Image: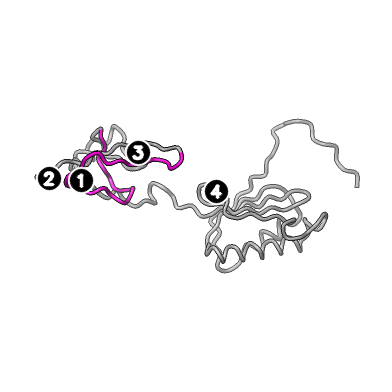
Amino acid sequence: MWGLPLLCTFSTNSKKGPILKKIYSSFFPLPSDPWLKVTGVNGRPETLFGSMYNNDDKSSLMKSHFGSPQWMGSASTILTDLAPKLLIKCTLNNIFLELSGEKGRPIWAISAGCLGFKNAQKTTNKTALAMMDALWLKLSQLSISKIRVDFRGVNPARQILLSQLRRPGLEIAEIMDTTPKPFNGPRPKKARRI
């Protein structure tokens, strides 16, 4: 006798996200790993993140025993393990660095003004070197060895920031340039006379 199957219901809580509630089980324990296949109330294999099967995949449903936990494979096939993202925003008068986690939540942020630079000093090469030193200190404190880099904006110190990222002990997964470009938007400001 296999015992009664594990029946689960999925409810969402706005503050804590999805919650798996156990209704009844006599033989199968509640899995601690969200990638374990668990038969839901409707008789289809589900995980904490919803159903992983299409209607066409009925043969794999028949192979697994109703209600038995079974490993679905490596989590990297479903979710990619993203490295933290470093946003380097270069404006005409300042430089901003922001380190954010895999879901976009900010971990750490700094600007040239936070380091004590004022006015025209905020866009110099010396400022860029000081900001990268502060970034290296924070990355070593957080023990981060792999990042994704996103450049935004144009600044003369941008090349120095890029060259300072190439240090041993740091792997750069990808480099992107997301400088906003207008597609014939509003009329630009009058250019400065220098």
Vertical position of residue 163 compared to residue 85: above or below: below
Q: Position of residue 47 (x, y in %)?
A: 32, 42
Q: Are marks 1 and 2 in contact (CB under 8 Å)?
A: yes
For label 3, the residue is 50
For label 1, the residue is 68
Q: Is residue 118 left or right of residue 171?
A: right
Residue 105 numbered tag: 4
* Real-space Cα separation, disc 1 to disc 2, in angstroms: 9 Å
* Real-space Cα separation, disc 2 to disc 3, in angstroms: 25 Å
Which of pointers 4 and 3 indicates the residue nearer the eye? 4
Vertical position of residue 125 compared to residue 1: above or below: below
Is 30 included in the stretch rendered in magenta? yes
* Real-space Cα separation, disc 3 to disc 1, in angstroms: 17 Å
Which of the two labelled residues, at mark 4 and mark 3, occupies the earlier sequence position? Answer: 3
The magenta segment is 15-41
Which of the two labelled residues, at mark 3 and mark 1, occupies the earlier sequence position? Answer: 3
Q: Residue at x 36, y 41 (%)?
A: 19
Residue count near mark 2 (Cα–Cα under 10 Å), binned few <14, some 14–19, many ≥20 = few
* Real-space Cα separation, disc 4 to disc 3, in angstroms: 24 Å
* Residue type pointed to by label 3: Gly
Q: Position of residue 143 (x, y in %)?
A: 52, 64
Q: Is residue 86 left or right of residue 61?
A: right
* Residue type pointed to by label 2: Trp
Which of the two labelled residues, at mark 1 and mark 2, occupies the earlier sequence position? Answer: 2
Scheme of image coloration = one colour
Q: Residue furthest left?
A: 1
Which of the two labelled residues, at mark 1 and mark 4, occupies the earlier sequence position? Answer: 1
Q: Quadrant of residue 179?
A: top right
- Look at the numbered disc 2 and give the secondary structure of its residue: loop
Vertical position of residue 142 compared to residue 69: above or below: below
Residue count near mark 3 (Cα–Cα under 10 Å), binned few <14, some 14–19, many ≥20 = few
